[in-house]
Amino acid sequence: MLFRQFPGLPTAITFIKWSWHFWMGAGGGELDLKNSVQVNFDRALREESIALHLRFHQLGTAAEYSLIGYDEMQAVACLADPKRPGICALQYLAGAVGCSVFRGIASAFNLRGELAPAKSPILHLPLLRLMAFPAFVMADPDARGPLMPILKLLRSAQQK
């Protein structure tokens, strides 16, 4: 497998929908990824999506959620276990309606949530924003923070 050739990598992995299940079935579970940030991401907001997120690395009943806004029209719900800060799920939410629908689904699953940022289990916020909103973050000329060197590199590669 490719990652065995680079033992320090990957540092961040984004799985889309149920792709993590196939990754584990294909032997990806044999890699030592304990130092990487692993995210499951889904754009379609459905009860099935949340159920799948909760199976990702067995987040289950330990999951708490916080909302990460990008702008007035976009946000993601971040489901995370405070005891495992590198594992989380991101659920895309379209506007206030998406946030409201998510809150209803979260309530049906008895998820603890809307934690204040200081009490949130979310670490790596700039990285999670990049994973959830890559096109928007990369296009933002005023983006700041620890990911700026990476963003500058990605922007320069796009211009070539």
Image (tube, rainbow, N blue to C red):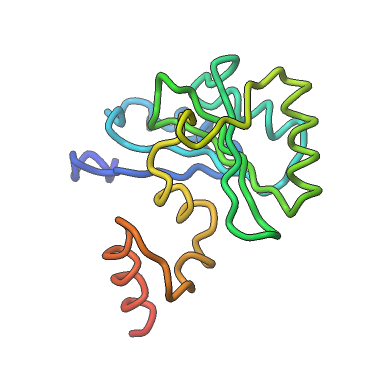
Q: Quadrant of the C terminus?
A: bottom left
Seen in the picture, residue 109 relative to 15 is either above or below; the reply is above
Locate the N terminus and report the quarter of the image it occupies: top left
Q: Position of residue 53 (x, y in %)?
A: 60, 30
Residue at x 32%, y 76% (from the top left corner): 157
Q: Residue at x 30, y 63 (%)?
A: 150
From the viewer's perspective, is 68 left or right of 14?
right
Measuring 41% from the left and 51% from the top, which residue is drawn there?
126
Question: At which x and y percent is residue 159?
Answer: 37, 84
- Percent across and percent down for residue 136 are 53, 67
In the picture provided, is 135 more to the left or to the right than 10? right
Nearest to the observer: residue 47 or residue 62: 62
Residue at the outermost top position: 61
In the rendered image, the vertical position of residue 26 relative to residue 129, given as above or below: above
Picture quarter containing residue 105?
A: top right
Location of residue 69 in the rendering, given as x and y in whole percent from the top left corner: 60, 51
